[in-house]
Image (cartoon, rainbow, N blue to C red):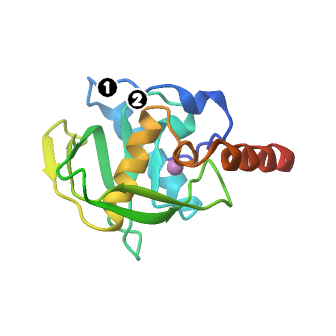
Amino acid sequence: MAIRKILKFPDQDLRTKAENIAVFDDELKVLTDDMLETMYSVNGIGLAATQIGIHKRVAVIDISPEKNEPLIIINPEVEILDATKKEDYDEGCLSVPGFFETISRPSEIKLIYKNLEGSQKEIKPEGLLTKVIQHELDHLNGRLFVDHISQLKRRRIRNKIVKQK
Ligand code: NI
């Protein structure tokens, strides 16, 4: 396993739309192992392949307190079950370190994905998991949580991160 470098906003590579995975092989297993190790190394709860510059539709998530319940989602698709129901949450992102903004997202969703073996799975997540899933799916589509806030705020965050470098 290896820790990979996490790209930081405003890196343009974070804007690339990821492609579906067709082959479920050892290479994919190595990638997800590395993604989990990378996420755990910085106490993250979610990491999309896009964030390490790999443009494939795979993300890893672990919201458990003990960090021992990894969820690997491949070719994920989210179905919004009730567009009128939304919840606010203060989101952060490993690619936008140190910044948190309140984001409103649908709270009633269904996640359809493939596991490491290529089997189709379906879950109806609750609470924090609904937010993390939608956040990671955004990454795979080249979007960041700061795209949900005003341009003014986004520019301010970008300038601060650029200055830190
Ligand atoms: Ni993120």
Secondary element at image label 2: loop
**Residue identified by numbered label 2:** 56
Mark 1 Cα-neighbour bin, 10 Å: few <14, some 14–19, many ≥20: some
The label number, if any, that marks residue 149 in the structure image? none
Asked if the residue at label 1 sits under 8 Å from ligand 1, the reply is: no
Asked whether the beta carbons under mark 1 and mark 2 sit within 8 Å of each other, the answer is yes
Quadrant in which the C terminus is drawn: top right
**Amino acid bearing label 1:** Asn
- Which residue is denoted by mark 1 in the rendering? 20
The residue positioned 28% from the left and 60% from the top of the image is 107
Taking the spot 37% from the left edge, 23% from the top edge, the residue there is 19
- Note whether 116 is above or below 86 in the view shown: above
Give coordinates of residue 119: x percent, y percent: 14, 39
Task: Say which amino acid is labelled 2.
Answer: Lys
Residue at screen point 16% across, 54% down = 123
Name the foreground residue: 15 vs 1: 15
Most extreme residue toward the bottom is: 65
Left or right: residue 143 versus residue 60 is right
10 Å crowding of disc 2: few (<14), some (14-19), many (20+): many
135, 43: nearer the viewer: 135
Give x and y (percent) for residue 116. Answer: 25, 41
Position of residue 124 in the picture relative to residue 11 (left or right)? left
Residue at figure coordinates x 75%, y 48% from the top left: 156
Instruction: Tell me which label, 1 or 2, sits earlier in the chain.
Output: 1
Q: Quadrant of residue 73?
A: top left
Q: CA distance from mark 1 to mark 2?
A: 6 Å
Q: Horizontal and vertical percent for residue 3?
A: 58, 48
Q: Is residue 16 above or below residue 80?
A: above
